[in-house]
């Protein structure tokens, strides 16, 4: 499988923040969800890929081509022609109309298709004569997505693009992304706080916290395999003493009503501890236990 994006040992230091040794890959045909709290390093990673900030160390390849600080301008330009980007806010001049935004984008991308843009505007019900400043949050995001898709990109990078959208608008956006991913040459890197969106579309989930990768797993390993056990104190001590978890692998969160335990394989856990209540994990609960759980 070809890698559309490959980041290795990416590091960037700011006053009070240190992005350190980030490894991340987006294979063709896959959607990679990037999760973590605000300020964790997600946007710094994305801006490094786009050349908006220069990392202090590490390498970034787009479509097998180095696009780091010392790459040739021609190589970087060619690679970026194949990338579509949607940020959490609309970046077009406020006074421009939707139609004028399309004309502006046509000068930026060699593969820009006015016909595709027109089709996207009709699909998203975007009025061509409406000024950017008069668009709602949902319409602004749809305009950004229409622009990102109308130059036939191989890789989409979405930074909190669905934040603030109502459920119907988010579902429509996800449908559009699923349609884009019908072509197995395509890939998506999608940062989002809305983990339910990632559960619907992602193939892999990568978590960044305090500038470090906490985990990078297949989404199905979370939603299909992992579980959350709900224990009383005595049950928890029995689980901890059983040897089922290797040292340093037992993660738990204490609540007034009991203790939650992350079971990476809920089927194996259920066989070993038949009397313990166990639910399927979702990305939110998995994330909480990985970031906030006690380790034993």
Image (spheres, rainbow, N blue to C red):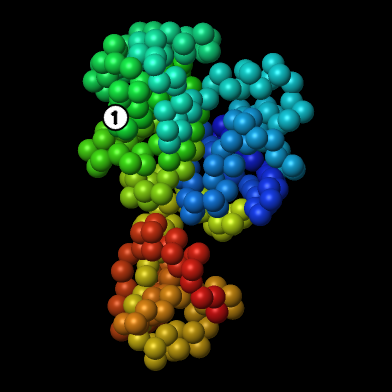
Q: Could you say where residue 36 lies in the image, as x and y percent from the top left?
A: 49, 53
**Element type at mark 1:** loop
Q: Could you say where residue 62 lies in the image, as x and y percent from the top left?
A: 62, 29
Locate residue 92: give its quadrant. Answer: top left
Q: Is 105 in front, or is 95?
A: 95
Q: Residue at x 53, y 25 (%)?
A: 83
Query: Residue lying farthest bottom?
Result: 234
Q: Could you say where residue 213 lies in the image, as x and y percent from the top left?
A: 59, 54
Judge from the rendering whether residue 159 lies leftward or rightward of residue 75; answer left or right: left
Q: Is 281 in front, or is 71?
A: 71
Q: Is 186 in front, or is 159?
A: 159
Judge from the rendering whether residue 44 lies leftward or rightward of residue 159; answer left or right: right
Q: Residue at x 53, y 37 (%)?
A: 27
Picture quarter with the N terminus: top right
Q: Is 27 in front, or is 36?
A: 36
Whether residue 179 is visible here, answered yes or no, is no
Q: Reply above or below: 184 against 257.
A: above
Q: Which residue is mark 1?
A: 136
Q: Residue at x 37, y 70 (%)?
A: 228
Q: Reply above or below: 6 against 115.
A: below
Q: Reply above or below: 12 against 122.
A: below
Judge from the rendering whether residue 277 lies leftward or rightward of residue 34; answer left or right: left
């Amino acid at each position: 499988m070809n890698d559309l994006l490959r980041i290795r040992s990416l590091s960037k230091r700011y006053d009070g923040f240190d992005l350190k040794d980030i490894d991340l890959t987006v294979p063709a045909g896959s959607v990679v969800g990037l999760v973590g709290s605000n300020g964790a390093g997600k946007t710094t990673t994305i801006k490094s890929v786009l050349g908006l900030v220069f990392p202090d160390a590490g390498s970034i390849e787009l479509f097998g081509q180095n696009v780091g600080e010392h790459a040739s301008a021609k190589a970087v330009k060619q690679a970026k022609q194949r990338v579509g980007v949607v940020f959490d806010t609309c970046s077009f001049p406020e006074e421009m109309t939707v139609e004028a935004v399309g004309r502006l984008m046509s000068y930026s991308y060699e593969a820009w298709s006015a016909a595709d843009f027109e089709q996207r505007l009709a699909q998203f019900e975007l009025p061509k004569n409406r000024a950017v400043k008069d668009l709602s949050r949902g319409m602004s995001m749809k305009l950004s997505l229409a622009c990102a898709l109308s130059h036939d990109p191989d890789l989409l990078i979405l930074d909190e693009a669905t934040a603030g959208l109502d459920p119907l608008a988010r579902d429509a956006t996800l449908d559009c992304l699923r349609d884009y991913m019908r072509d197995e040459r395509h890939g998506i890197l999608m940062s989002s706080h809305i983990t339910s969106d990632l559960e619907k579309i992602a193939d892999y989930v990568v978590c960044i916290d305090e500038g470090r990768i906490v985990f990078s797993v297949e989404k199905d390993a979370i939603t299909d395999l992992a579980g959350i056990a709900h224990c009383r104190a005595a049950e928890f001590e029995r689980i901890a003493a059983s040897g089922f978890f290797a040292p340093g692998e037992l993660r738990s969160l204490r609540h007034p009503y009991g203790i939650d335990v992350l079971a990476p394989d809920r089927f194996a856990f259920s066989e070993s501890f038949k009397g313990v209540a166990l639910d399927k994990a979702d990305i939110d609960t998995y994330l909480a236990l990985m970031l906030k759980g006690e380790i034993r």
